[in-house]
Image (cartoon, rainbow, N blue to C red):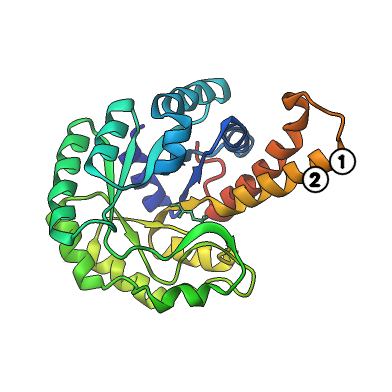
Amino acid sequence: MKAREWLEKAKQEQFAIGAFNVGNIETFKAIAQAAANKKSPVIIESSPGETKWMEPENVVDLAKNYSAEYQIPILVNLDHGESLQDCLLAAEAGYDLIHFDGGKLPYEQYLAQLKQVVEAAHHKNLTVEGEIDHIAGSSEVHTGSASTQFQTAQMTNPQKAGQFVKEAGIDIFAAFFGNVHGVYAEGGENLHFDLLRQIAQATNCFLSLHGGSGIPDDQVKEAIKLGIVKINVNTEMRQAFKDTLQKVLQDNPQEYAMYKIEPPVVEAVQKIVEHKIDVFGSADKA
Ligand code: 13P
């Protein structure tokens, strides 16, 4: 099934597909094993930095290999592509979903380039995700509270979003309704459900939830009921990876074989992904 069909199935059956970032083969393994255990479809995704590090062809090939090995659907998403070139390269490499975040471009220029991406992607039956609000935060562990991120950020205006989706012809809209990227030591996020309802009505397309780390599970479930079908998760996996690796290295100073150091790290990341799959309701949907 293509990405569009999976998103349609998620919409009909009220679940969301997790889009999990990959930074190396260990995170890849963790996501694939979690999806296999839970019999869940998954999206693996790479940001521009992760794409450069992994190299797009490797991301696509690893997804194919793990999908065949574990007999589970693995789709590949470009996460926050920043330029027309980023998006076209990913489409060429074999990505299934292309997210073009025009936050760094003037609106008219972004819209014009996004239309080109839509045309190229739809030609290959790929989906395109657009974003106009620059969803706040970053995929890191922050010391302050999530609310400080809103001082400079404005949430989605439903009318503007509706107009944008129609003009650009995109498939997925990245909605900003209280969700921020990252984990916050002094207080997490609170989603604004009335705003999400209005966005869903005005856009009438698939909706994604960015900043999937640190949002209380009950709020995530409510957002899925209101139409969210794709949820991006990165920081909680990064945190599990780093904390566990640090501990394993500390506890085993004489161990030098990577394949002996990494299993507990993979297991820790896998646990995060399995929990998210349960919350998103995508288990047993593969
Ligand atoms: P988190 O880092 O908050 O999980 O967000 C990830 C994300 O939205 C990637 O696009």
Q: Position of residue 41 (x, y in %)?
A: 49, 38
Q: In this view of the protein, can residue 220 be seen by the observer? A: yes
Q: In this view of the protein, can residue 212 be seen by the observer? A: no
Side (left or right) of 163 relative to 263: left
Q: Inspect the image, locate mark 2, and give the three-letter code of the amino acid beneath it.
A: Lys
* Label 1 beta carbon less than 8 Å to ligand 1: no
Side (left or right) of 185 relative to 105: right
| Element type where label 1 sits in the image | helix
Q: Position of residue 4 (x, y in %)?
A: 31, 41
The residue positioned 29% from the left and 39% from the top of the image is 86
Q: Inspect the image, locate mark 1, and give the three-letter code of the amino acid beneath it.
A: Asp
The residue positioned 42% from the left and 27% from the top of the image is 60
Which numbered circle lies on residue 247? 2
Which is nearer the eye, 267 or 276? 267
Marks 2/1 in contact by CB < 8 Å: the verdict is: yes
In the picture of the structure, the residue carrying the numbered disc 1 is 251
